[in-house]
Amino acid sequence: MKAIFKASVGLMLAVSAATALSQDVPVVSVINVKTMDPQGYTQYLADNPQIMSSLGAQMGGTCLTVSGHRYPNQAFAWTIFPNAAAAFKAARMYSQAPANPELDALRENVSSEFYAILKPFTKPSGWERRFQMVINDVPGFIKAATALEKSMQDAGHPVEIGIFMPMGAGKTKAGLIDIRIFAVEPEIGGALAQHVLSGQHDRAAMGAMQSFIESVELDTFEDCKQVFAAE
C-alpha cells in the first residue's frame, strides 16, 4: 500500500510539473467496447454529434485496435474534456442516460476509464502505437520522451509522443502510465519503425528514455478517427 501511495503521489507531482502554467489538466474519457461493425459504429457517432456534445466534450472519436488485442473486436470511443471535473460530470451523465437501441446494436460496452494528459500533443487522430508501461520516475520519463520525440522529428519523422496518467482504470499497477506515438498515417508509423529497427535512431536519446521503464505491460497498434469537435 505504501508503494502504491508513493507512486500515486509521484504521478500527481508529474501532472503538476507538466502543467505548471495552467490549473486545468485535460482529461480523456474512454469507453472500451466490442463491435462487429467498427466502421458502422464510428459512422454512427459521426452522424450523431449530439451524443458527445450533450456531455460537454471538446472533441471525440473512436479507435479500432489493429494488433495486440486484449479481447476480440476491440475498439473504444474517446472524448476529451478541459479538466477532470468536466470529465467526471460527463461520466455521471452518460451512466444515467436512457438506453440507445441503435447504438446498442452496434457495440457492447466492456469498461471505461479516464486519462489525464501529462504531455500534450497536436497531431490529429490516426495511426497510433500505444504502450502501457510502469515508470520509475514520471517527470524524468516525460523529459526524456520529449527529447526522443525531437530527435525523431529532426530525422524527418513527423510524429509526436503523448503521455497520459490512467485514472479509475480498475486493477492496475503502481507507476503505470499510457504512452501514444501519433503517426497519423500507417506509412509514417512504418517508416519510424524501420528507422529504429535499422539502428538509425538516436541511441542515446532512446537509452535515456528506456532507463525510466520498469516494464512494458501493453503494446498495441490502433487506427483512430476524430468524429466530433465542439463548435
Image (cartoon, rainbow, N blue to C red):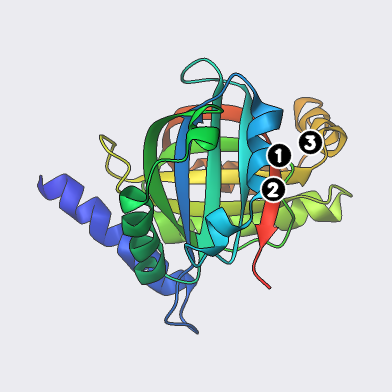
The image shows residue 145 at horizontal and vertical percentages of 59, 53
Secondary structure of the residue carrying numbered label 3: helix
How far apart are the alpha carbons under marks 2 and 3?
Answer: 25 Å
Q: Position of residue 126 (x, y in %)?
A: 74, 43
The residue under label 3 is 189
* Furthest residue toward left: 1
Residue at the disc numbered 2:
46
* SS type, badge 1: helix
Q: Residue at x 63, y 45 (%)?
A: 45
The three-letter code of the residue at mark 2 reads Ala
> Against 137, is 75 above or below?
above
- In this rendered view, identify the residue nearer to me: 220 or 154: 220
Amino acid beneath label 1:
Gln
Secondary structure of the residue carrying tag 2 is: helix
Q: In front: 118, or 229?
A: 229
Q: Image check: 180 left or right of 193? A: left
Residue 182 is situated, as x and y percent measured from the top left of the image, at 70, 47
Q: Nearer the viewer, mark 2 or mark 3?
A: 2
Which residue: 56% across, 28% down?
A: 106
Residue behind mark 1: 43
Using a 10 Å C-alpha cutoff, classify the residue at mark 2 as few (fewer than 14 neighbours), some (14 to 19) or many (20 or more): some
Q: Is residue 186 visible?
A: yes
Q: Are marks 3 and 1 in contact (CB under 8 Å)?
A: no
* Residues tagged 2 and 1 counted as in contact (Cβ below 8 A): yes
Residue in the foreground of this view, choosing between 137 and 117? 117
Amino acid tagged 3: Gly
17 to the left or right of 126? left
Q: Residues within 10 Å of mark 1 (few under 14, many from 20)?
A: some
Q: Is residue 167 visible?
A: no
Residue at point 54%, 54% (across, down):
51
Q: Earlier in the sequence, mark 2 or mark 3?
A: 2
CA separation in Å, label 2 and label 1: 5 Å
